[in-house]
Image (cartoon, rainbow, N blue to C red):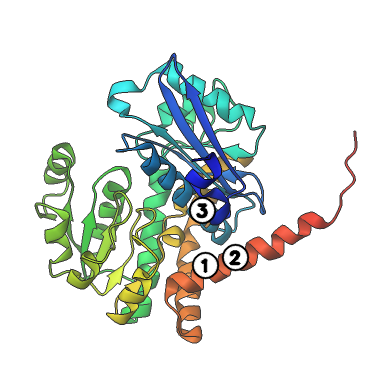
């Protein structure tokens, strides 16, 4: 089977899919560039032990497409891309592997900017940056923005506030029960925002360390054993904050929440889930809208990072979410469809301007 048919990149509309391998370090990576209509593609690097190469490729295709839409709705002049490194970061992540990966990113000449994602951290980006200029999410000590989960969580909270206003008439989670699935980098910060707002938090995580952390830090949080019990709990808002696909044919019928707003990418397991949610009267705040705070943070780093400026931009996720929910009502479509339409319109209208020739001075 050929590369194009195996990745189905042409069918998904991707501009470019790059396979990277360095046998000496064990690096196996795939970089997906969905669109550069608005500018260079920006998206993080996920380091994960996929069950198969096919799973890794499918993930990078889905994630890079999502980044294009996310960046468009975040009002960034950046396209959408993503990368995955196939393997267990606890077993194979080394400085040589990360630097090899950085060389591949550099070889793209600025078509793709990378950053952190699941399995990669600020310290990793500092290493990658030793081999490429096209990396964001670096440490403050190296002139970067630091941990992007800070503004990711802030943006999710803003999107959740907009959804609460749309559903219940007031932009607050005070008195609401919010189920947080995943207490990782983003879930921890989101939990604090929710508690500060007066929400009651119910949470779960597969990591014993994460559960121990929340027990000691926020003992008022109710913990449940697993995601299934969280979904069927008596909650008002469900916040998926781990890996994608949380909303599927099994979980949506069992979900008791009336609002979904979380940090995870690609929460809808397949097309049609958005209609299932709408048919059940569940308001879905599209994931790539509300979780854009992180990419806003690392994108600001390209200009020369200013936290207050980036936070102000992430706060506007409230307004974007409100606009999308209002548009969805007026057009009689699910919010995910309304969000797609807005993103596609901006990519088409602004991307068209690239046809206006500019003379370059030597």
Q: Mark 3 — residue?
A: 65
Q: Quadrant of residue 288?
A: bottom left
Q: Mark 2: few, some, or many residues within 10 Å (few <14, many ≥20)? A: some
Observer-nearest of 93 and 144:
93
Residue 154 on image: x %, y %: 39, 54
Element at label 3: helix
Question: Is 248 above or below relative to 47?
Answer: below
Q: Is residue 273 left or right of residue 320?
A: left
Q: Residue at x 31, y 49 (%)?
A: 243
Q: CA distance from mark 1 to mark 2?
A: 6 Å
Q: Mark 3: few, some, or many residues within 10 Å (few <14, many ≥20)? A: many
Q: Mark 1 — residue?
A: 340
Q: CA distance from mark 1 to mark 3?
A: 11 Å
Q: CA distance from mark 2 to mark 3?
A: 11 Å
Residue 94 on image: x %, y %: 38, 18
Q: Mark 2 — residue?
A: 344
Residue 229 on image: x %, y %: 11, 60
Element at label 1: helix
Element at label 2: helix
- Tell me if label 1 and label 2 are in contact, CB under 8 Å: yes
């Amino acid at each position: 089977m050929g590369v194009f048919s195996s990745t189905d990149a042409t069918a998904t509309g991707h501009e470019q899919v790059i396979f990277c391998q360095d046998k000496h370090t064990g690096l196996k990576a795939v970089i997906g560039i969905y669109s550069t209509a608005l500018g260079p593609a920006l998206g993080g690097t996920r380091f994960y032990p996929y069950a198969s190469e096919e799973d890794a490729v499918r993930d990078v295709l889905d994630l890079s497409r999502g980044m294009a839409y996310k960046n468009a709705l975040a009002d960034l002049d950046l396209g959408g891309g993503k990368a995955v490194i196939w393997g267990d970061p606890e077993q194979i992540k080394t400085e040589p592997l990360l630097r090899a990966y950085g060389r591949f990113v550099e070889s793209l000449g600025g078509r793709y900017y990378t950053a952190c994602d699941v399995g990669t951290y600020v310290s990793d980006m500092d290493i990658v940056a030793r081999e490429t200029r096209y990396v964001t999410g670096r440490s403050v000590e190296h002139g970067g923005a630091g941990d992007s989960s800070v503004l990711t969580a802030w943006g999710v909270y803003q999107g959740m506030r907009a959804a609460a206003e749309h559903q219940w008439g007031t932009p607050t989670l005070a008195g609401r029960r919010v189920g947080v699935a995943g207490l990782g980098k983003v879930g921890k910060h989101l939990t604090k925002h929710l508690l500060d707002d007066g929400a009651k938090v119910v949470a779960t995580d597969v990591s014993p360390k994460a559960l121990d952390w929340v027990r000691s830090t926020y003992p008022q949080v109710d913990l449940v054993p697993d995601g299934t019990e969280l979904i069927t709990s008596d909650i008002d808002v469900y916040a998926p904050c781990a890996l994608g696909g949380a909303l599927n044919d099994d979980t949506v019928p069992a979900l008791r929440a009336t609002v979904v707003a979380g940090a995870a990418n690609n929460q809808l397991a397949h097309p049609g889930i958005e209609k299932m949610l709408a048919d059940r009267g569940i308001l879905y705040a599209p994931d790539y809208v509300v979780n854009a705070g992180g990419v806003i943070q690392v994108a600001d780093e390209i200009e020369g990072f200013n936290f207050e400026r980036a936070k102000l931009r992430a706060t506007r996720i409230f307004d974007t979410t409100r606009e999308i929910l209002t548009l969805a009502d007026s057009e009689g479509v699910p919010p995910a469809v309304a969000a797609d339409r807005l993103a596609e319109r901006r990519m088409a209208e602004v991307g068209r301007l690239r046809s206006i020739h500019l003379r370059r001075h030597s």
